[in-house]
Image: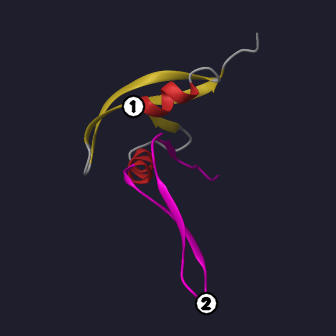
Amino acid sequence: MLKVRSGIHAGPAVAGVIGNRKLLYDVWGETVNTASRMESHGEPGRIQVTTAAKEELDQSYQFERRGSVDVKGVGDVETWWRTGRQAAT
């Protein structure tokens, strides 16, 4: 059985194409790094998000507070588990 961890953060990022012959598309920035840390500090089968991401997604999804996580290069980050969709009204 395949178990996947996911991490989400919201904020500014920079994207661009690198190369002349073989083109590569990439995304950079603190937002990308923090999202990556959310994934690596998460648990299999769960989606961990930062408060910034939770605030962006609050209208559509439900969350359970995980608490503060010490994230390398960032420090203590308040995190949440995405638990499901909001009920349709």
Q: Residue at x 40, y 55 (%)?
A: 29
Q: Regarding mark 1 in the picture, which secondary structure is present there?
A: strand
* Residue 21 inside the magenta-drawn segment: yes
User: What colour scheme was applied to this rendering of the protein?
Assistant: secondary structure
Q: Which mark is residue 79?
A: 1
Residue 17 placement (x, y as % from top left): 56, 72
Q: Residue at x 49, y 25 (%)?
A: 55
User: As drawn, is 51 to the left or to the right of 19?
Assistant: left
Q: Regarding mark 2 in the picture, which secondary structure is present there?
A: loop
User: As drawn, is 33 to the left or to the right of 86?
Assistant: left
The amino acid at mark 2 is Arg
- Choose top left, top right, bottom left or bottom right for residue 80: top left
In the picture, the quarter occupied by the C terminus is top right
User: As drawn, is 75 to the left or to the right of 26?
Assistant: left
Mark 1 is surrounded, within 10 Å at the Cα level, by few (under 14), some (14 to 19) or many (20 or more) other residues, namely many
- Choose top left, top right, bottom left or bottom right for residue 20: bottom right
Q: Find the magenta span and give its range.
A: 1-30
Mark 2 is surrounded, within 10 Å at the Cα level, by few (under 14), some (14 to 19) or many (20 or more) other residues, namely few
Q: Which mark is residue 27?
A: none
Decide which of 83, 74 is in the foreground and name it. Answer: 74
**Would you name the residue on which mark 2 appears?**
21
* Residue 6 inside the magenta-drawn segment: yes
Residue 47 placement (x, y as % from top left): 53, 38
The amino acid at mark 1 is Thr
Q: Residue at x 62, y 53 (%)?
A: 2
Decide which of 76, 16 is in the foreground and name it. Answer: 16
Ranked by sequence position, the earlier of labels 1 and 2 is 2
